[in-house]
Amino acid sequence: MTNVGQAGRLTSNDGVDRLPWAAIGLLTLLALALRIAAARGALWLDEAWSAQFAHEVRTPGAVFFAINHDNNHYLNTLWLQLVGWGAPPILARALSIACGTASVIVAGLIGARRGRTQAIILAALFAISPILLTYGAEARGYAPMLLALLIGIWLVDRDVAGRPLPGAARALGYAGAFGMLAHLAMLPGLLALAAWALAARLSRREKLPQAIGGSLRLMRGALLAAMGVVGVMVLAAHASPDGYRIGSYQAFSLEALHSGLETMIAASFGLGFLPGALLLAIAAIALPLVAWRLPVIRDRALFLALLLYALPGAALLLQLGNSGIPRYYLIVALGLLLLMGEVLAAGWTSGGARRVATVAAIALIAVGSAVQDSRIIANRRANPGGAITAMAARMPHGSEVMISSSRDSAVLAAAAASASYSLHIIPEGCPPTRFLFGEQDDAAAFPDHPIRCGHAYRKIMSARADGLSGVNWQLYERE
């Protein structure tokens, strides 16, 4: 029999039967609509190269053994191979859209162990979070990985509470394999889950051998899956004459680390209008403060601490490269969203002044996320397909374009294939092409009238990325 305790807490065996399905369903539909809207526009740089890799190697086996590149997120590449080169962008992004949308339901299930209020709040946070909207609507492996990790959290959370779900170990194995095939960022998440499961058993005064055995029985399938995927990656890289390749590398700097973390935190809650240093300081002290004030969260505190602090700490201590890229901290964002769900649910159920403050915080996050989400949707990652549209308007039957960097070739090729437009891309040399395309990551101004191969070019179209993904580009026509 199911009972509802104080503050609306669920006390059923699994919480699923009392999940507020109507509210979760509406939030899931909202998440789906937002992700479909954000999935418009041609593939941007990283997506386009993933599609080109999938097209070039042609077979599923080659996805694992022939690419050997950090831009090869196995499940995503297999999906791109399945839908085919030149597929409509929304179809290329469909795997991420589906996984990003499903994450809203799983977030609600995680919150359901605390009560209806937390279930709804967590589902809402995961539906509108700008960082989850971004990566839940592009052809990369991040959204499938986050879905798998959330499923793992739900399963281990039930085990920690002493109410394990039937078949949890097997389900964790499948989730671990799915997440690792989606993105290697699943690995630290799995290690954190294993540590959490072990610590929970020790807190129940189990002897160390029994605690280790119990946590291994729960996590064995997931950890074996992780070892298998890492082993395949290492063997493939070792067998390749080029080894394992990284698309771009930026040396570590403390400034970059701060920037990446600040951007990630702001994008998690739509709070980009607040000072980044303030957000970083609040995030750094949030867990100890909340654990002190809300003893109910202590059963999740270790796992949240590992999600929040382990990866940034490792980046700082080991001075890891590319530490300024916000998406590398997606599992930290997930931890922050889970922690925020705890705080807001506790504030709501407390009533009085705390409820008023909670309503204000929810409104701030909702408005900030809505503004940032709308900008992401409108910008479409600076939609490089606009360059194809502009060239097709001037030369409907096909054209040639010179590029300023070899990395631009996949972007234009993917956009042209999706639009069924015949485009010959000239990476080097000096043929008299009518068009010139250039792109860059930073905000530096493009030249207005560049000279290439003795010819002057004039700008006809440009776009700048507004969000976490995309590149700035400019299209020129020969004068």
Image (cartoon, helix red, strand yellow):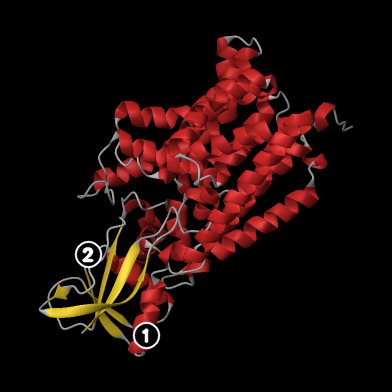
Q: Which one is in front, 206 or 130?
A: 130
Residue position for label 1 = 392
Residue visible at 23% across and 64% down in the picture: 406
- Quadrant in the rendering for residue 402: bottom left
Residue position for label 2 = 405
| Secondary structure under the numbered disc 1 in the rendered image | helix
Q: Residues within 10 Å of mark 2 (few under 14, many from 20)?
A: few
Farthest residue, direction left: 454
| Secondary structure under the numbered disc 2 in the rendered image | loop
Give me the disc on residue 466: none
Residue 300: percent from left, percent from top: 62, 26
On screen, residue 317 versus residue 130, left or right, reads: left
- The quarter in which the N terminus is drawn is top right
Residue 446: percent from left, percent from top: 26, 66
- Disc nearer the start of the sequence (2/1): 1
Residue visible at 38% across and 70% down in the picture: 384
Asked whether residue 254 is in view, the answer is yes
Residue visible at 84% across and 26% down in the picture: 6
Count every numbered label the image shows and give the total: 2
Three-letter code, disc 1: Ala
Residue 87: percent from left, percent from top: 47, 72
On screen, residue 346 versus residue 36, left or right, reads: right
